[in-house]
Amino acid sequence: MKRYEGKRNGTAADVTVDGVPLNPRLDLWNHSPSGFEWGYAGSGPAQLALALLADCLGDDEAAIEAHHDFKDAVVAGLPYAGWILTEEEIQDTLMELENP
């Protein structure tokens, strides 16, 4: 099971998947060329939501379709200092979003 982790490094917001930097997937949608963010509903959190879903699902189209809802439901509420999400938590959240 994949483990996603976000940490603050000074002013930078670093995100890894199993210890490796998460691909921001700017090729799918360029919300935030300056990097990831979380804890609010802006362009950096939208990029993070897209990257998390693309990596977790392995389905670019599904990631594009769901990333705004996932941003609002999860990424906007992540703690500023740092967080951990598992692949299972992400998939469970998507199931809840699809079947309220």
Image: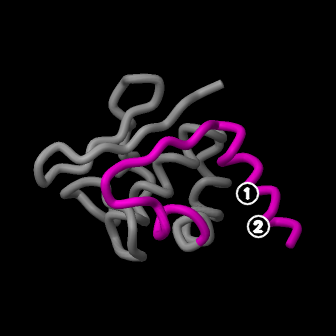
Is residue 58 in view? Answer: no
Relative horizontal placement of residue 12, taking residue 49 as reference (left or right):
left
Q: Residue at x 11, y 48 (%)?
A: 10
Pick the front one: 85 or 47:
85
Q: Quadrant of the N terminus?
A: top right
Other-residue count near label 1 (Cα within 10 Å), few / some / many at <14 / 14–19 / ≥20: some
Q: Which residue is mark 2?
A: 97
Relative height, residue 55 to residue 100 (above, below):
above
Relative horizontal placement of residue 55, taking residue 11 as reference (left or right):
right
x and y percentages locating residue 33 in the rendered image:
23, 57
Kind of residue indicated by mark 1: Leu
Q: Residue at x 61, y 69 (%)?
A: 73
x and y percentages locating residue 50 in the rendered image:
49, 55
Is residue 35 in view? Answer: yes
Q: How is the image coloured?
A: one colour
User: For the magenta stretch, what is the residue range?
Assistant: 73-100
Relative height, residue 84 to residue 41 (above, below):
above
Q: Which residue is mark 1?
A: 94
Kindly state the secondary structure of the residue where label 2 is placed. Answer: helix
Residue at the right extreme of this rendering: 99
x and y percentages locating residue 26 in the rendered image:
35, 51
Q: Is residue 92 magenta?
A: yes
